[in-house]
Image (cartoon, rainbow, N blue to C red):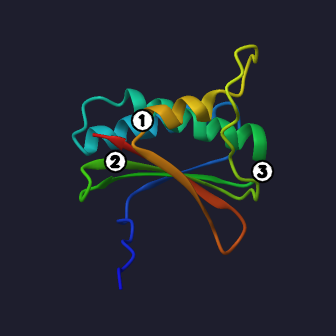
Amino acid sequence: MPTAALAPETPALVLEPSDRAPAKARRYLTERFRELKIADDYIGRLVVTELVTNVHKHVGFGHIVIRVFPDEEADLVVIEVRDEGTGLPVVGPEDHDAIGGRGLLLMAQLVHDWGVRPLNEEGKIVWARCAR
């Protein structure tokens, strides 16, 4: 029977949902990538910006908890964004006339994989695994 791999203990950033949260999340991600000796943080910054912005726009309450850690087995890096909302993110259909709503679609194209893990208590963790 396979065992579940546990995420390593890593420093987390805790934010309030606000219009400043995405910038704080980007700075945290850049620091974590530097600590992990990952030179290119462009995709990571894009991912964390999208996920934190979605919490600010669609949840709007509670804490946002961000963690960034290596997935050594797959040679990837994991970005997790936890929030207290119950709604799940949905990748909408491509709409060339829309002025917004493309962030998750774009993110899904740029990362190795991503998903949502509902929590027993209120909330969820949206995660993405990116190339190092």
Residue at left offset 24%, top offset 57%: 72
Q: What amino acid type should be assigned to the residue bearing mark 1?
A: Gly
Q: Which residue is mark 3?
A: 61
Nearer to me, 73 or 28: 73
Say which label, 2 or 1, has the lower sequence index. 1
Say what secondary structure mark 2 lies in.
strand
Residue 46 lies left or right of residue 83; in this view the side is left
**Corner quadrant of residue 10:** bottom left
Mark positioned earlier in the residue sequence (2 or 3): 3
For the residues labelled 2 and 1, say whether their Cβ atoms are less than 8 Å apart: yes
Q: Amino acid at mark 2?
A: Val
Query: Could you tell me which secondary element the residue under label 1 belongs to?
Result: helix
Residue positioned 41% across, 56% down in the render: 11
Quadrant of the frame with the N terminus: bottom left
* Mark carried by residue 44: 1
Percent x, y of residue 14? 57, 52
Q: Which image quadrant for residue 91?
A: top right
Instruction: List the single residue furthest toward the left.
Output: 37
How far apart are the two marked residues, 2 and 1, measured between alpha carbons? 9 Å
| Residue marked by disc 2 | 77
Residue 78 locus on image (x, y percent): 40, 50
In the image, is residue 129 above or below residue 101?
A: below
